[in-house]
Image (tube, helix red, strand yellow):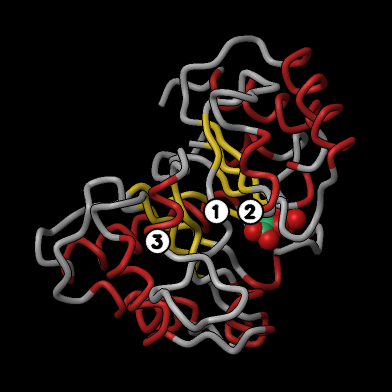
């Protein structure tokens, strides 16, 4: 699974050229590959207006309630579209919008079994330096405790210090963390689900292969490199070339 998070980027013109570049570079595809554009552009990707062979699209975040919540988009609204997933818990939502684990758990509960959830977790640089990465991730994963999770529930491991920095952990360390995440979710969810785990943080067409080769890396969540259709297709081609 490869997911591109466009964050607050995009325009009508950018989407047209992105789609043309993506389709030109892609060598066919068997995987679930999607982008999360700003929600105002969702209709550019639906089956009526589809500009590209990209498989799907989804939301960068969602609100767990509806009604008097200016600016919010609810799960029911996502269900009304062809939205394939919603990301929740991105470190930018945690830092800039002060979202905490209890709010993110509410979002997970409202999406669960309705729209595929991609839960982002990751440690800060100081936490990594102190050697407490697993403790931090375990704490963030507490939100799954006691929930019967949808079988499509997915985690994205995104070390905060790797996002947009050009820095990444070593592939073997990512692999070990992904195994740990699968084990923690399996032990704590009601239905003992072992989720797919994506890696996110400075993935490019130059380093993607080193991550995808690792046993417990089920794909990637990509920020900056997903904004160029041709680079994104190159990463998808690399993923498809590895027997998963
Ligand atoms: C992200 O913000 O989810 C991300 C992975 O960003 P980048 O690929 O730019 O590091």
Q: Which of the numbered marks, if any, corresponds to residue 39? A: 2
User: Considering depth in this image, is 171 or 230 the residue closer to the camera?
Assistant: 230
What is the residue that sits farthest to the right in this orientation? 13
Whether the residues at callouts 2 and 1 have beta carbons within 8 Å, the answer is yes
How many numbered marks are there? Answer: 3
Rate crowding at label 1 as few (under 14), some (14 to 19) or many (20 or more) other CA atoms within 10 Å.
many
- Which of the image's four quarters has the C terminus? top left
Residue occupying the point 62% across, 27% down:
236
Whether the residues at callouts 3 and 2 have beta carbons within 8 Å, the answer is no
Q: Is residue 28 visible?
A: yes
- x, y (%) of residue 189? 17, 67
Tell me where residue 101 sits by quadrant.
bottom left
Q: CA distance from mark 3 to mark 2?
A: 13 Å
Residue occupying the point 53% across, 26% down:
55
Q: Which residue is mark 1?
A: 59
- As helix, strand or loop, the secondary structure at mark 3 comes to helix
Residue occupying the point 56% across, 31% down:
46
Mark toward the start of the polypeptide (1 vs 3) = 1
- x, y (%) of residue 243? 44, 20
Q: Is residue 201 visible?
A: no
User: Considering depth in this image, is 12 or 4 the residue closer to the camera?
Assistant: 12
Tell me where residue 72 sits by quadrant.
bottom right
Q: Which of the numbered marks, if any, corresponds to residue 75? A: 3
Mark toward the start of the polypeptide (2 vs 1) = 2
């Amino acid at each position: 699974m490869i997911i591109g998070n466009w964050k607050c980027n995009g325009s009508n013109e950018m989407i047209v050229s992105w789609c043309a570049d993506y389709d030109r570079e892609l060598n066919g595809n068997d995987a679930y590959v999607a982008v999360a554009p700003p929600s105002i552009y969702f209709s550019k990707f639906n089956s009526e207006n589809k500009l590209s062979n990209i498989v799907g699209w989804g939301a960068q975040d969602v609100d767990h309630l509806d009604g008097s919540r200016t600016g919010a988009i609810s799960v029911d609204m996502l269900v009304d579209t062809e939205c394939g997933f919603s990301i929740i818990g991105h470190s930018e939502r945690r830092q800039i919008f002060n979202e905490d684990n209890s709010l993110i758990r509410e979002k997970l509960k409202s999406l669960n079994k309705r729209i595929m959830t991609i839960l982002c977790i990751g440690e800060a640089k100081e936490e990594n330096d102190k050697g407490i990465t697993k403790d931090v991730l375990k704490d963030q994963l507490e939100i799954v405790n006691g929930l019967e999770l949808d079988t499509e529930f997915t985690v994205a491991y995104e070390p905060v210090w790797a996002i947009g920095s050009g820095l990444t952990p070593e592939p073997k360390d990512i692999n070990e963390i992904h195994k740990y995440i699968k084990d923690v979710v399996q032990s704590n969810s009601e239905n003992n689900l072992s989720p797919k785990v994506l890696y996110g943080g400075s993935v490019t067409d130059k380093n993607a292969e080193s991550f995808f080769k690792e046993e417990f890396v089920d794909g990637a969540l990509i920020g900056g490199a997903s904004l160029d259709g041709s680079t994104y297709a190159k990463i998808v081609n690399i993923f498809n070339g590895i027997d998963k």
